[in-house]
Amino acid sequence: MNLTDYHSKEMQNTLQREVEVSGTGIFTGERSSVKICPAPEGSGLFFQRVDLEGSPKIPALAKFVQETPRCTRLSNENASVMMVEHLLSALYACGVDNARICIEGPEVPGLDGSSKLFVDLIEKAGLRVQSMPRSYITVQQPVFWSQKDVHLVALPSSEFRLSYTMHYPKCPLIKSQYYSLTVDPVRYREEIAPCRTFSLYEEILPFIERGLIKGGGLENALVIRGDKILNPEGARFADEMVRHKILDLIGDLSLTGSRLRAHVIAICSGHSSNVALAKLLSIQNPPQESVFGQSEICQESARENGYVYMQPGSP
């Protein structure tokens, strides 16, 4: 199924039917299952820990991010979910605005370390156009975040474009890599979704020794040691590493809760800096339409984040 034939750029979209996948968490090593379900207009993307009492919900918004090494974790007073960025990246890039993500377990399954299997699930489910206009954050003037060697800037643009530069001077295999693309479902599926999370062997070893990565391995990550890739099959692209950085960036920027019209240029950014930019974009460029609708959880989130809640059809 071609997602571009089934989703609207102006109206909100949800799934036609629910889809499910199970797997092991890269960090916790625990088995978990995720069911991605349709949701009403204005619901946004939100997780629901159906394995916990009361099935608490966590909106996929930057406000709910808590620091976690090497991944993005959403948390509130009732529950938390970690490693959300790959699934959110796929949902955003494929045009899904509203979805209830039911999860059993504390971590989204790592699968093969990319977002390809999530894209496959979304294509299997199909998209349904809804009746409420999309919410857009349109950057009118540069918005930037910078700290030491990490820099991000969002520039005015009529489309959502990402340009990423990474620099690993101590790794002869990676060195410097650059990639740029306008985000749309087709290019994302072909150029970004297959790209796996990666790590330098020397960087990841201390996390493994401290028990912080219990489910990671060559089956769900690209591991690099010196000038060699340890995975027997090698890299899927020569620049798979920088492409995965773009995959992560899309997932983290989706936490604005709105579609984006901006050209985001990132240099050596990671999850914490990506989320910092998402927060700045939400504050400095309020959405043109409310991303929140009739659902109770999203009305409450709208008030807490300083947005004006608009009933469908409001002027």
Image (cartoon, rainbow, N blue to C red):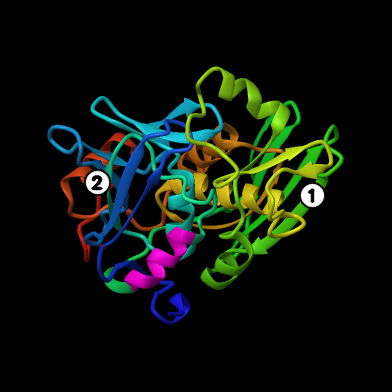
Image spot of residue 270 (x, y percent): 62, 36
**Amino acid at pointer 1:** Gln
* Residue highlighted by disc 2: 298
Q: Residues within 10 Å of mark 1 (few under 14, many from 20)?
A: some
Residue 307 seen in render: no
Q: Which residues are magenta?
A: 117-126
Whether 70 is among the magenta residues is: no
Q: Quadrant of residue 65?
A: top left
Total tally of numbered discs in the picture:
2
- Closer to the chain start, of discs 1 and 2, is 1
SS category of the residue bearing label 1: strand
Choose between 38 and 9: the one closer to the eye: 38
Residue lying farthest to the front in this orientation: 232
Image spot of residue 163 (x, y percent): 70, 54
* Residue highlighted by disc 1: 177
Q: Quadrant of residue 274?
A: top right
Q: Quadrant of residue 301?
A: top left
SS category of the residue bearing label 2: helix
Image spot of residue 168 (x, y percent): 80, 37
Residue lying farthest to the bottom in this orientation: 5
| Callout in the foreground (1, 2) | 1
Residue lying farthest to the top in this orientation: 210
Whether 124 is among the magenta residues is: yes
Give left or right: position of 103 versus 280. Answer: left
